[in-house]
Image (tube, rainbow, N blue to C red):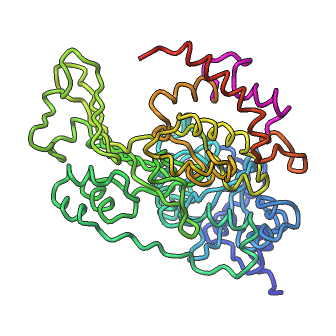
Amino acid sequence: MPKRSPASDSLFEFPADLPVPAALRDLLRAFPALRPHTATVSGSFAFHSEPPSAVARYFGEEGHAGGLAAAQHLGVFGVEPDGSTLAVWRAPQGGMPVVYLSSEGGGRVLASDAWQFLRLLGVGYDEFALYGNLDEPPEEDGEVAPELLQWLADQGLSVPETGEDILSEAEQRWPDFDGWMEDAIAGRLSASAPGPAPVRAAPAPTGAAAAAEGNLWDQMLSCIGRRIDDPLVQQWLAAVGAKPLKPATPHNERTYVSVRATGIEVGAEMAPKHRAFWPPRKEGRIWNTYVTRIILPVKAAPLVPLPEGMSWDHFPGPMDGDRFMEQPVNGRLELAFQRAAKGNGIARIDARLPTERDFMEASAEYEETKPLVYVEDAFFVTWCALHGLLDPVRYPAAVLAPWHERTATPLQLLHGPCGRIVWTDDLAPGASDFWDDYYRGFGTPDSERWVTDVKAVFRSSNHFREPDEAMTPDSWEAFDRIAPKIARRFEVWRSKAPQG
C-alpha cells in the first residue's frame, strides 16, 4: 500500500492516495488555532478527521462493500453538530469538489474545490443541509473566525454576500454526485473501477424549436416540458439573462432560476405529475429534469413582447371576474393570468405544464422487497374497472376483457393497463369523487373508509405486514371477499352524491 503523505498524517486521515487540498493545508498551517474541533471557524462548522473505514457508514452497514469503495474517494475534513460531515470528493470525471454528507443519509455538492468552500465558510452560514439554494444571506450574522477572513483576504479571495453562485457552479459541474451515492449504497461501485461519468448528449432541436427562433414568447412556450439540457431551453435562458438550470435530485426534486432585473422565474422538476414524464427517469447517474413553469411578470414586457392580440393593459377574463384565469392550450401547456392590483391589466403570466392528479401509485422499487404490497389497491381499481368507473376511452371493453373473464389477476391490471398508476383522466366522469371520499378518505369518517374495510376483511393491509408474514394473495377468491364491501360503499355514496 502506498505510504500516506506527511501532509495527510499531520492534518486529516484521507485515503492514502488522496491528497489534502492546498487551501486546507495552507490555512491550517498559517492558523493552527483553527485546527481543534472546539475552535470557532464559521457557524457550527469545525475541522474534523475521520478514517475511510468510518466514512463508509454514510453508505450502509459496517463492512458494506459499496460504502468501503466510496470511502476511498472521500476525504473528511469537517463536521457539524448533528454528525453531518464535509469531505473532498475525488469525482470520477475529474476534480475534487467539496461535498456534504448528511447524518440522516444523502448528500450534495457544495463547492467546486476547497478554495471555493473556504469562501463559502466566510459567508457565515450556521449549518449546511441537503436542501436550499443558499440564495439568501445568513439570517443572523454568523460567527466567522477573523483568522479565516484574514487568510481569505491575504489570498485575494473575496467573501460573497450569499453562497448561491458557489453552490450553483458546483451543482452544474457535478450533477451526478447523488447518483454516485446511490450506486455506492446499492453496491455498484465495487463491481468495477470508477470511470468517467457519462456525458449527456443534449437532444437535437425539433422543428418546433427551429420555428420558435427569434421569438422569445414562442420560445418560452416551447420550453415547457423540455429537458433542461435542451438547446432551446438553454438558448432562451441565456436570452433572458437567466443562469442555466441545474438537475434535480431525490433530495431536491425541484430547481429554479430567477432574473432579478425582470422578475422572470423558471422552475424545473425531475418528477412532474404528468403522464408523459412518469415515472422519473435517469440517464447514468443523472435524473432527467424538465422545465415545468415559467413566470413572466409585467416588468419583463420590454424583453418578452406578447403576441398580437394579447396586451398587458387588458386582463383576458371578465372585468368583474376572479384575479386569476387559467387557459388550457394543449396537453403540455396551460397559461394562468393574474390580474394587476390596480387597473385592468395583467400582473403576470404563468406558463406551466398541466399537473395531473395521481390517485394510486405503485412503486416498482417497493415491490422488490414486498411483491404483493399493492394487492388490496389492485382489488379496488379492478372493482372500479368492472363497474364502469374507469374512463371507457382509455380502458375499452377489449382491454378489460381478461378481467371480466377472470383470466388475468387484479395485480396484473394495476401493473399492465394502468402502468402502476391511476391518474385523474383514467377515471370516468364523476368517479373521482368516489375515489376521494372512500378510497382516499377525504372528509369521510374513519369507519366508512377503504382502509377500515381492508382491515375488517383481511385484518391488515399488505402495506403493514412484514416481508416474512403471510400476505393477502393476488387471487379472485381474495377479491371476492372485499368486493361486496366496495359495492355497498358505492351504493351509499351514490345515494348521497349530488345528481346531474
Which residue corresponds to the image point at 63% horizontal and 60% vertical from the top-left? 99
293 to the left or right of 434: left
Q: Nearer the viewer, residue 479 or 223?
A: 479
Position of the N terminus by quadrant: bottom right
Q: Residue at x 80, y 64 (%)?
A: 56
The percent position of residue 103, horizontal first and vertical second, equals 75, 50
Q: Does 226 sit left or right of 358 as displayed?
A: left
Along the viewing direction, whichever of 475 and 1 lies nearer the viewer: 475
Which residue is outermost to the left? 308
Please, is residue 257 above or below residue 288 in the view?
A: above
Magenta span has 73? no
In depth, the one of 314 and 495 nearer the eye is 495
The residue located at (56%, 75%) in the rendering is 197
Say above or below: 146 vs 499.
below
Estimate the x, y position of residue 60 in percent, counting from the top left. Answer: 81, 60
Quadrant of residue 110 within the rendered picture: bottom right
Per the rendered image, the range of residues in magenta is 440-461
Q: Quadrant of the C terminus?
A: top left
Residue 129 visible from this viewpoint: no
Q: Is residue 310 left or right of residue 8?
A: left
Q: Is residue 301 visible?
A: yes
Residue at x-position 76% and y-position 25%: 452
Give the residue furthest to the bottom.
2
Q: Percent x, y for residue 430?
A: 47, 27
In reply to whether residue 445 is colored magenta, the answer given is yes
